[in-house]
Amino acid sequence: MSGNRAALAAAMPSLLAHEGVWEGSYVHLDADGTERDRHAARILCRFPDAGPFHYVQHNRFRWADGRETEAELPGVLRDGRLWWDLPSFSGCAWEGGEGTILLRLDRRDEPGVSFVELIVLGAGGIERGRTWHWFQNGRLIRRTLCTERRVSAAPPPAPPGAGTP
């Protein structure tokens, strides 16, 4: 292993186990636990060995009413953490021990809103759970529960223009 992947493996070795395509659901709950939104997700996690980004995530979300949205989220390794600086959010990820990944992200598209995410990979690397705790100006406003199953360990080829914001 060399290049970007080697640097990422040295700083965040557990993260590389998330490479591939994941499918599942995202459920958003308000602070009282009432469901506010649910949608299907297809997440592609890749780790380019060369180029400006150490990590690129492609998201596709689909709702039962036919709505669909896609996003590309490239991150760069700096000071032992994976960092994002995007129009919708900024923040970083780090390893929390025991194979867990933690993120702290500030939303730019929702003033005063931030969230902390925990990602846990199940034994065998087939399923993972993610929980997000959302705060606005210090007050818990919602939670997101993500349940995902790996459908492909090897990521498909990058789409044209992938890896650039």
Image (cartoon, rainbow, N blue to C red):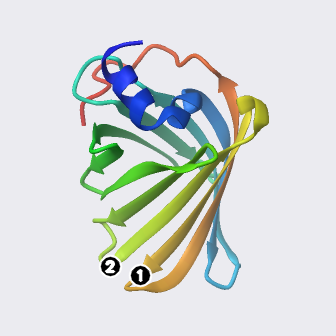
Q: Pinpoint residue 45: horizontal percent, then vertical percent.
A: 49, 31
Along the viewing direction, whichever of 45 and 104 lies nearer the viewer:
104
Label annotation for residue 21: none
Along the viewing direction, whichever of 104 and 86 lies nearer the viewer:
104
Residue 32 in the figure: left or right of residue 91: right
Q: Quadrant of residue 43?
A: top right
Packing grade of label 1 (10 A; few <14, some 14-19, many >=20) is some
**Mark 1 → mark 2, Cα distance in angstroms:** 5 Å
Say if 40 sits above or below 13 in the image. Answer: below
Q: Amino acid at mark 2?
A: Gly
Q: Pinpoint residue 57: horizontal percent, then vertical percent.
A: 43, 36
Q: Pinpoint residue 161: horizontal percent, then vertical percent.
A: 27, 22
Mark 1 touching mark 2, by CB under 8 A? yes
Say if 59 sits above or below 2 in the image. Answer: below
Residue lying at 44% horizontally and 28% vertically, measured from the top left: 9
Sooner in the amino-acid sequence: mark 1 or mark 2: 2
Residue 97 in the figure: left or right of residue 7: right
Residue lying at 58% horizontally and 29% vertically, measured from the top left: 17
Q: Amino acid at mark 1?
A: Gln
Label annotation for residue 112: 2
**Which residue does the numbered mark 1 point to in the structure image?**
136
Q: Quadrant of residue 5?
A: top left
Residue lying at 55% horizontally and 36% vertically, measured from the top left: 14
Q: How many marks?
A: 2
At mark 2, the secondary structure is loop
Residue 39 in the figure: left or right of residue 14: right
Q: Pinpoint residue 137: horizontal percent, then vertical percent.
A: 37, 85
Packing grade of label 2 (10 A; few <14, some 14-19, many >=20) is few
At mark 1, the secondary structure is strand
